[in-house]
Amino acid sequence: MITYSVIKKSQLEGPTRLDSEYYQPEYLKLSNLFRKLNTIKLGDLSFITDGQHGYFKLDPESEIRQITAQHIINGFVDKTNADRLSIETHEKNLRASLNEGDVVCTTVGTVGNAAIITKDVPPANLDQNVARIHLKSKIIDPWYLVIFLNSKYGQLQIKRHITGQVQQRLSLETVRKLLIAVLENQQKIGTLLREVYQNLSSGNELYSQAEDLLLEELGLKDFRPTEELSYIVDLSDVKSAQRTDAEYFQPRYKKIEEILVKNFNAKKIRTLDFIKVTTGQYSEEYITDGRPYIRGTDLAQGTVSLDNLVYIDPQKQISSKKAREGDVVVTRVGTIGISARLPKEVEGGTISDNLIRLRFPEETINSYYVSLFFNTIGSQLMIRESRGSVQARLNQETLKEIVLPILTKPTQQKIADLVQQSHQARKKGKELLEKAKREVEELIEGTAKKNDHRK
């Protein structure tokens, strides 16, 4: 059904907005709604900037995290897999240095995701695709602001002002012009987001407990290998591994393997015939209504984040690359060794070619346990097996060289229970986030209606 709007010349918002998309009925309805509210421009109560442009330097020893759009999830920043930014780059971009209570919002690609900066995020800085919003006024509570920007009425404003066909963008000037509804009960809305944070924090804590339990059981919790500057390797070992790079032969890797093999009878994956290993399917053609296409950027905390999933045409799926609940996947390009157990929500989707999938019967080994192993000790062994100087890569044959310890079933289950509880806590947090967004939308509609009756 065709929709249209009739706009008077006097209603046009300057010579730069003559496009029909800007005056869609839903946007005109939004403008009419906001005229019935007490609003303020975001730029009038905050300092707004973006992150560093151009060259930047990373430093694996730095404590400063580089926050990008992919780290903004469900109203918060997950810095777990964020790169570490050099102090030199950080000090040249102090305007984008994040403080507790700041709000960030994505401005390129997946535009309009907002998050609060909690106390556990700094020290951190931004890249150029994220805006930093530092409130200078107490008129707006930052926790409420995040809910408002992520709600229908924040997102409609953002959607209306997006530019770009191939890659969507939101300019900083547009961010400054966003209208924020000043509501009487914004503290209550902010409290709901704090409840979300408590649930997410609980989920993170449970996941950490699972990691600690795994490392304790493997006798590696207090394992602190020394980084030796020089070491001697037999020529026969070099020929056997077909590797000549010094990093591969770092003694710490050999020590980890010795502990796992000697104490837990760990075996190389290629010898475990009940595990089937394969890579995924390449695709750059995404559609709105299709089957989930699971990429490395979708993996977080041992599972798949459903927030930024893309979808592919079911007719173009390769049957052998389809996802099944309980499959374990690991990243094989770029950041090596991030792992997840695929949840039921993505079953029937397709795994990306940048992932390696392990499939096995649940009765042989617990999938939650396997995923956690790869996210801890296994990730170090995968980094060792990867190749490439510019971009590290791991293939399915080299993954099969990694040793996998199989703990007792009761121990695996204890670890799995903690991981599942962590997923449940985060799921509850997401449900609370949706509740908070609905409440702010209902409050806006109710306030507008009340003010309209007073006229």
Image (cartoon, rainbow, N blue to C red):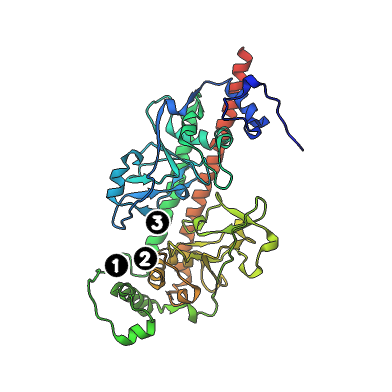
Q: Which residue matches tag 2?
A: 215
**Left or right: where does residue 75 sit relative to residue 451?**
left
Q: Secondary structure at mark 1?
A: loop
Q: Which residue matches tag 3?
A: 208
Q: Which mark is residue 223?
A: 1
Label 3: how many residues lie within 10 Å, few (<14), some (14-19) or many (20+)? some
The answer to which of marks 2 and 1 sits earlier in the sequence is 2
Q: Amino acid at mark 3?
A: Ser
> Which residue, as the protein is rendered here, is positioned at the far top?
455
Q: Position of residue 384 (x, y in %)?
A: 37, 71
Q: Secondary structure at mark 3?
A: helix
Q: Residue at x 43, y 75 (%)?
A: 402
Callouts 2 and 1 close, C-beta under 8 Å: yes
Q: Amino acid at mark 2?
A: Leu
Q: Is residue 121 visible?
A: no
The answer to which of marks 1 and 3 sits earlier in the sequence is 3
Q: Amino acid at mark 1?
A: Phe
Spatial separation of the CA atoms under disc 1 and disc 3? 17 Å
Callouts 2 and 3 close, C-beta under 8 Å: no
Quadrant placement of the C terminus: top right
